[in-house]
Image (tube, rainbow, N blue to C red):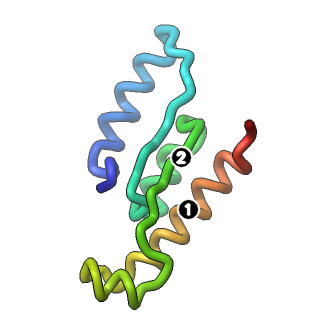
């Protein structure tokens, strides 16, 4: 599952909460199948992306989840996530 359909509400809420003092790392927990446009909308807001990618091959995705184009789309979304936040730092 992906919270993509809630992104407008998430952003609206955060734009109210951050000026009021919200100072915690913001984590976006997703199945990894968000559109690149959705991830770009979160640029500068999310501190940690947590994609739970299930398939590395479109063939396997189609076989088990009827999702032929899932992998190509998810790779682009994950590249955008990485572009925004970079490497994991411990």
Quarter of the figure with residue 71: bottom left
Q: Residue at x 36, y 30 (%)?
A: 12
Q: Residue at x 45, y 73 (%)?
A: 73
Q: Is residue 39 above or below residue 6?
A: below
Could you say where residue 49 lies in the image, as x and y percent from the top left? 53, 46
Q: Tag 2's secondary structure?
A: strand
In this figure, which residue is indicated by the disc labeled 1? 78
Quarter of the figure with residue 13: top left
In this figure, which residue is indicated by the disc labeled 2? 49
Q: Callout 2: few (<14), some (14-19), or many (20+) C-alpha neighbours within 10 Å?
A: some
Could you say where residue 65 lies in the image, as x and y percent from the top left? 26, 78
Give yes or no for contact between labels 1 and 2 (Cβ–Cβ under 8 Å): yes
**Front residue of this view, candidates 49 and 40:** 49
Q: Quadrant of the C terminus?
A: top right
Q: Residue at x 65, y 55 (%)?
A: 82
Q: Callout 1: few (<14), some (14-19), or many (20+) C-alpha neighbours within 10 Å?
A: many
Q: Is residue 36 above or below residue 27?
A: below
Reading the chain from its start, which is encountered first: label 1 or label 2? 2
Q: Is residue 46 left or right of residue 7?
A: right
Q: Is residue 54 above or below residue 43?
A: below
Quarter of the figure with residue 89: top right
Could you say where residue 80 lies in the image, as x and y percent from the top left? 59, 59
Q: Is residue 19 left or right of residue 8?
A: right
């Amino acid at each position: 599952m992906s919270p993509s359909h809630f992104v407008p509400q998430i952003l609206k809420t955060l734009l109210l909460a951050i000026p009021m003092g919200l100072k915690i790392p913001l984590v976006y927990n997703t199945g990894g199948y968000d559109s690149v446009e959705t991830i770009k909308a979160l640029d500068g807001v999310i501190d940690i992306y947590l994609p739970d990618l299930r398939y590395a091959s479109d063939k396997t995705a189609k076989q088990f989840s009827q999702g032929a184009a899932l992998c190509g789309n998810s790779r682009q979304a994950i590249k955008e996530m990485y572009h925004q936040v970079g490497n994991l730092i411990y």
